[in-house]
Structure formats: structure tokens, C-alpha cells
Amino acid sequence: MADLGKAIQGVEPAAEAVNIRRIVTGHDETGKAIFIEDRICPHRFAIGGCENFVTAEIWRQTETPVNNDGDYMDTADRSFHINPDPNGNVFRIMQFPPDGELGMKEDGVTPEPPMMHRTASLDYAMVLDGEVYAVIDGGETLMKKGDILIQRGTIHAWSNRSGKPCTILFVLSAANPTPGMEYK
């Protein structure tokens, strides 16, 4: 079964999965607003060794508030890590393949929800395309295109039982860990 928290070295993401155009602005030496970057985001990772389970790491901040002064630095140019930095945030887009491609039973809950994990973060998750079940230890709900989940540090998993890929936009903001909870 794929591990949501790991990008496996040597496994390339499927060519068509989450090719997101990333445009970054900044300032020239006179203070005029300019476009610094305009390209397909180069930070794509195959999760758990599955070429169709892909994340595009669009942006990552190590702290807030953010300092927009100075030279441009590609903050997402690093290895995949599911959690935001302790005082930062992460903006990513993920493609979830159908459960069967990840070696999971297609009902998503046998014997227990797949890939359950908890992050020390406040997560905003919006389904951009397809559908997916948001699974928590207290139940599950089907999310479709346009639905948004506010994930408040709860243990959770994602189960795609549709037979087609599901694409989700995530913004994770660092949060204080809840005492007594296990985090991945």
C-alpha cells in the first residue's frame, strides 16, 4: 500500500498528472512589479511509488509573516515533506488515483480506512476535479468538484472509489500539535 507521507526516489510521476503552470511575481531594482517565473511547476513527486499518485508542490513558506523583499528564491525546491514547517505553510495540488491503483480495497474502509494520518496543521482542501471520500475515524463524507474541507488536525485519509483520478488543492498552515495525539 502506498505511504502518503513518502515520495519514493526513482519513481517518476505520470507525465499528464498535475502539470500546473506556476507564475511568480516580484520587483525589479526600481520597485516595479514584474513576473519572475512562468512555467510548469517543476516540483512534482510520485507518492508511495505510484506514478499516478502525484503531488505538485507549488509553494512553501518556512515562516509567517512572509518577507516579500529581496531576491527571488524558489521555496518549493526541496524534497517532499507532507507537513508544513513549524511556523509556515504549504500550497500543493495532488492527484489521487482510484483506490485499486494503490493496492487498497475499493470500499476504502476494509479493514480500516487507508493511509490514516494526522498532520500538525490546519488544512484547506478543495476538490478541483473528480470525487473522493474524506475519511475520519468518526465517519466519512463524499466530496465532489468545488467542495471544501477544513481539516483541523484530525486523523484522516482519502479514498477514491470513483474509478477516475481526483485532483485536490491543499493549503496547510502550521498548527500547534494537540497534546496526546500522534502525528505523521
Image (tube, helix red, strand yellow):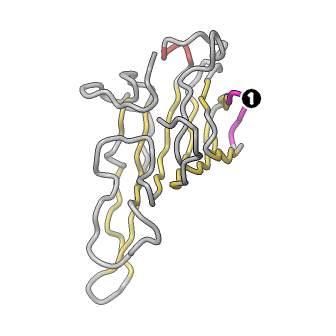
Residue interval drawn in magenta? 136-145
Q: Residue at x 38, y 41 (%)?
A: 81
| Residue corresponding to mark 1 | 138
Q: Nearer the viewer, residue 115 or 163?
A: 115
Question: The disc labelled 1 sits on which kind of residue?
Answer: Gly
Q: Residue at x 46, y 72 (%)?
A: 65
Q: Residue at x 67, y 28 (%)?
A: 135
Secondary structure that dominates the magenta span: strand
Compared across the picture, whether 176 is left or right of 68 comes to right
142 drawn magenta: yes
Where residue 175 appears, as percent x and y from the top left, is 55, 54
Is 18 rendered above or below residue 78? Answer: above
Q: Nearer the viewer, residue 116 or 47?
A: 116
Location of residue 131 (image quadrant): top right
Q: Secondary structure at mark 1?
A: loop
Location of residue 69 (image quadrant): bottom left
Q: Nearer the viewer, residue 82 or 49?
A: 82
Where residue 106 appears, as percent x and y from the top left, is 62, 12
